Image (cartoon, coloured by chain):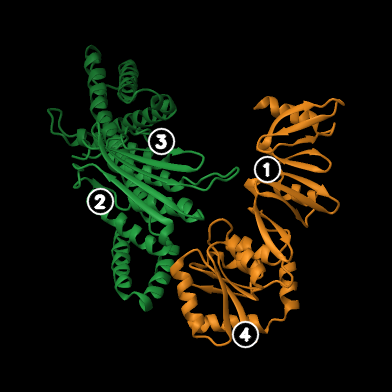
Chain colours: A green, B orange
Amino acid sequence: MATMQRPREWLPDLCRLPALTAMMVAAEIVVLLLALAPSQEGIWDFPRFYASSLFAQWLALSSALLLCKTRPLLHRLPVWLGALIAWLEPVSMAALGAYLLHEIDTGIGLHMTLPREYQAVFVGGVAALAAVISAAALRYFYVQQQWAEQVQAKADAEVRALQARIRPHFLFNSMNSIASLVRRDPETAERAIEDLADLFRAALGAGQGPASLDEEITLGERYLAIEKLRLGDRLEVEWQRDGDLPLDLQMPRLILQPLLENAIIHGVARLEHGGCIHIGLHVEAGQLLIRIGNPTPRLRGASGNSHAQASIEQRLRHHFGDAARVTIDRRDDYYECTLALPLAAAA
Amino acid sequence: MSMKVLIADDEPLARERLRDLLRDASGVQIVGEAANGREAVEMASETGADTVLLDISMPVVDGLEAARHLATLDPPPAVIFCTAYDEHALAAFEARAIDYLVKPVRAERLLQALQRAAQLSGDNVVALGREIKGEEKRRSHLCARMRGSLRLIPLEEVYYLQAEEKYTIVHHARGEDLIEESLKSLEKEFGDMFLRIHRNCLIAADELMELRRDADGQARAVLRSVDAELEVSRRSLPGLRQRVRGH
């Protein structure tokens, strides 16, 4: 199931021209419907249509103004309470307007509304109309806002997937390794080309749909195999995986590889004698834990770059919801990144 | 006369490739292979290499910093940078490399670069090297000259720096060395890593353990990793006191 995030700004700004126009058009449509509806009184005459339109427009504009002014307050309340108040505002505005109109109408004897003894019916009827229309309008705004947010979230996730693509350095370094191997060890060169092809196939499809855990692990292994060629004895890798891993688990593509790349670029490759990358895959308390640890150089006043981690966290949250977490443990000469993915939410 | 070339790259396969390409070239003698920037600087000075093929992204000391240290050699070797991706191109030319090669390096491009290096007279290379100083980002190592060869001292291993006339004595984990830089210029480059305790002395900020007065009432700084009590001037004392209390 897709994650339902609580929309923060569910009510649009009704003081802006497009929203105002929409409100006025909607009000006019209601008047038109009422005028066209068959009734005992026969067809409406023009004066009555003008007067009704005027009243409807006045109601629409004053309700819009009221909602617009109370909007910051409404957004601070819980959604259900804010929505209830937002719904009651046009209703009470309509009841008040109808009451005043009726008083004026009967007072000056125009007789465009109902007779004096039916005041409650007139006021109640107008308020009920307003209740139905504003409920429909609020629902529409809410759905539209949610849709806009989902489009935004999807676009963000795609941009981040693009950012996760493999760095050009890696491509050219790998090409250089292969150029060297072609003369000395054609078989290894062949394997390296195959691994590289798989990696770039995945990278080019980064924005297109999720991958399974199994695919992510395989991709990580291919990546490390190429880096092992490049770094030689300086790179060691130790995998620790549980026997019952959910290999079919769907997750965003290219999550593991960028973390391994970081472990190499900011860790092992910067150490004179290299080091060992520890990769742990465990199932614990309904979560899949992916842990990547690497030694780092000990530098005075050095600060790491966790931009990649932030991007990965956002992509995971988009896919798994807020239960997905990325935690970082940075020690003096060791760096460990842990991804916690909820297993139930993905089912 | 054959050209003495040093290869510096942290990747074994990348070194192999350059070796293969250079073997096909005439008049080239490979005098050594370095696996990081520090080795490159030290080997270049020991072997008297006249050209260094320098990878930019290397551990310990990167290629750009190694080039700055190499420029202090007399005569400095010609530096040809090699890199996988050309985002460093601008910085490399600011460091006044003779040429700049992208990986995988083509044989004909490599030969062209070596020719250019051979044509440049020593004087030109010196002139190129001199222009490097100043504006670049700070170094991770200090460079000491010992009987004609260079030795790099990691800044993390420096305990304190003492002025010795125009020069500076670096006291570090592996001993002490004289470097041809003034205390003042060092303070300017690495100011946030060191504390001034006296007109002639800077100590590493994380080395200050305590302040103490000796029998004559002279304030002295006690360092963490080295058995030395260094004289503290009256002017530096208040700031240091505050720092000791803060920790």
Q: Secondary structure at mark 3?
A: loop
The reply, left or right, for residue B33 in relation to residue A130 is right
* Residue on which the image places disc 3: A13
Q: Position of residue B163 (x, y in %)?
A: 81, 48
Residue B2: which numbered mark, if any? 4
Q: Nearer the viewer, mark 4 or mark 1?
A: 4
Residue B193: which numbered mark, if any? 1
Q: Position of residue B198 (x, y in %)?
A: 82, 38
Q: Nearer the viewer, mark 2 or mark 4?
A: 4
Say which amino acid is labelled 4: Ser
- Labels 3 and 2: the sequence-earlier one: 3
- Whole-number angstrom distance, CA of label 4 to CA of label 3: 78 Å
* Residue on which the image places disc 2: A210
Tell me where residue A321 sits by quadrant: top left
- Whole-number angstrom distance, CA of label 3 to CA of label 2: 36 Å
Would you call the spot at circle 1 few (<14 residues within 10 Å), some (14-19), or many (20 or more)? some
Q: Chain of mark 3?
A: A
Question: Do the residues under discs 4 and 1 have CB atoms within 8 angstroms?
Answer: no
Tell me where residue B179 sits by quadrant: bottom right
Say which amino acid is labelled 1: Met
The reply, left or right, for residue B233 in relation to residue B26 is right
Q: Quadrant of the N terminus of chain A?
A: top left
- Whole-number angstrom distance, CA of label 4 to CA of label 1: 44 Å
Depth order, front residue of A296/B146: B146
Depth order, front residue of B227/B135: B227
Tell me where residue B151 sits by quadrant: bottom right
- Whole-number angstrom distance, CA of label 2 to CA of label 4: 58 Å
- Whole-number angstrom distance, CA of label 2 to CA of label 1: 47 Å
Q: Secondary structure at mark 1?
A: helix
Would you call the spot at circle 4 few (<14 residues within 10 Å), some (14-19), or many (20 or more)? few
- Whole-number angstrom distance, CA of label 1 to CA of label 3: 53 Å
Please give the name of the residue rendered at 67% of the width and 26% of the height, measured from the top-left corner.
Answer: B246
